[in-house]
Image (cartoon, helix red, strand yellow):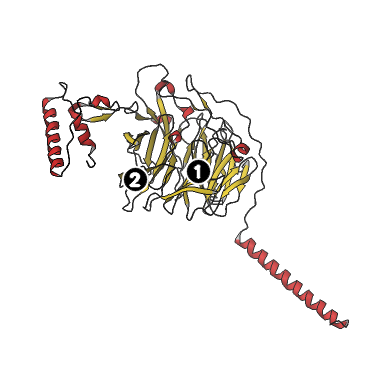
Amino acid sequence: MRHVPIFYILCLFYEPSSSVPQRATSQWMRQVAYFCDCAQAAGEQIPKRPASLSLHSFPSFHIAMAGRVVRSSKFRHVFGQPFKKENCYDELKVTRTAWDSNYVAANPLFFAVLWEAGGGGSFAVYPWSAPAGKIDPKLPLVAGHKSAVLDIDFHPFNDNLIASVSEDCTAKIWHIPSTGLTSTLTEPVQTLNGHKRKVGTVKFNPIADNLVATSSGDFSVKIWDIEKGQAKLSVDGQHSDLILSVDWNFNGSLLATSSKDKKVRLVDPRSNLVAQEAEAHLGIKPSRLVWLGQKEKLFTCGSTKTSEREYCLWDPRDFSKPLSRTSVDSASGVLMPFYDNDTSVLFLGGKGDGNIRYFEVTDEAPYIFPLSEFKSNNPQRGLALMPKRTVNVSECEIVRILKLGVKTLEPISFLVPRKSDIFQDDLYPDAPSGEPSLTGDEWLSGKNANPKTASMQGGFVQKERAAPVFDKQEETKPKSEKELQAEIEQLTKRVAYLESELVKKDSKIKELGGN
């Protein structure tokens, strides 16, 4: 028998119930009869349902009113609830750069936003402990880059450290006081020099302490030890076009990249080789990717040749074809994916959209099941997923996302509706504790480990950590065109002088009778 659609399979197990209206039952049965007639006319063999089977044999589905099939899930009724207006942030001067990044990052102490300011690249870091509402236009900024800042990422194990990358070909590490900035910060604790073109992405390793990955317009990916200020590894010659998105896998051993050449690559940075490579999305829109935690799958999103937005799911062991490919819509904004490993819920928001879709990821085909979506009239320019240790367990908040608008920042809580005040251990497995599992040197030597975890019951209290000691590297300032021209003129004069001295010495030798 050829492929039988799932609709017919469900028809086999349909059992009329007294709780279903007679009219609905009749409609359902007419649809079943019509489908069977069409199938028989096409030469299909219609199997009969074994007497021992019923729909109750499949616990992941149940039939609702009028025969509608609904998948069972404890996250089926998750809903997004934005913070009240007085707890949101307004009058932000969000950057106007055309580079595709999220523009916002956050941790339990601060949120950071790429800022529109003259005189080089800047970003704002604002403490959650400070008052919400309108932001002071004279807010102290982090302003040490000479060109626009393109991406930022908070240190996963030290809430006071943040990394930034810029068009000035550098990455910088900054230390932010716990109470926030009182004056503009221009001196980083570390500068990472080595890229030859603008640096577009930055991502800390989720396992090893003080290691960060950056990608650049020179088509390379570098792994830095931020304490020593040195590039310990560099993946060169493996990309043929601009790298758009980079993400670490669950245990921090592999990187995945998406590129402007429409390919997705699985990179082993410690071996400097690409383990898997495939054409992912054939459209011209930028593509993004995210690892699906312990599911050990890779999720990518981009567009088709006809500019429809789509997403794919990949098995990192085999990139010959995706496990699934699904069309989303025909909107123009870039899709931004985020994944919560503890609940296996995937969030998908588009730039310029007002909505955030969310899905549940399972281990069985078709793997990704739609749950619902958060809807809003306000378009988003960027999104950020808060660390799990920031959620409110007493309200059954499973995820908190920051939505960055044109001038606003709005936190959104995603909640599971439950009435009990007891700690819901099925919603809150042990979460990452904010402690490194390996040192940077251990990771570089080839060791792997899973993240350290801690219980969410009773709230999360992160342990105090000593600040790293930085061996600060002197920044080599690139010379301006005027300085380079002056240096050329000086060297030209020096060459002319030396040539004239040689002529004088030759004539002197001849006078003394030399040949």
Q: Nearer the viewer, residue 276 or 334?
A: 276
Q: Nearer the viewer, residue 152 or 258?
A: 258
Which one is earlier in the sequence, the residue at label 2 or at label 1? 1
Task: Say whether residue 406 is left or right of residue 152.
Answer: left
Residue 76 in sight here: yes
Residue 1 drawn at (x, y percent)? 22, 41
Q: Which residue is mark 2?
A: 310
Question: What is the distance, in whole Å, between disc 2 and disc 1 at their CAs?
Answer: 22 Å
Task: Say whether residue 37 is left or right of residue 326.
Answer: left
Task: State the count of labels.
Answer: 2
Q: Image quadrant for the C terminus? A: bottom right
Amino acid under disc 1: Leu
Whether residue 9 is situated above or below residue 168 in the rendered picture: above
Whether residue 351 is situated above or below residue 219 in the rendered picture: above
Determine whether label 2 and label 1 are within 8 Å by CB. no
Tell me the residue at 72%/73% (across/down).
496
Q: Nearer the viewer, residue 36 or 99?
A: 36
Residue 145 in sight here: no
Q: Which residue is mark 1?
A: 255
Amino acid under disc 2: Glu
Mark 1, residues whose alpha carbon is within 10 Å: few (<14), some, or many (≥20)?
A: many
- Determine the image quadrant of residue 9: top left
Task: Say whether residue 59 is left or right of residue 194.
Answer: left
Extreme right residue here? 512
Task: Say whether residue 255 is left or right of residue 35.
Answer: right
Residue 462 drawn at (x, y percent)? 55, 26
- Mark 1 lies on a secondary structure that is strand
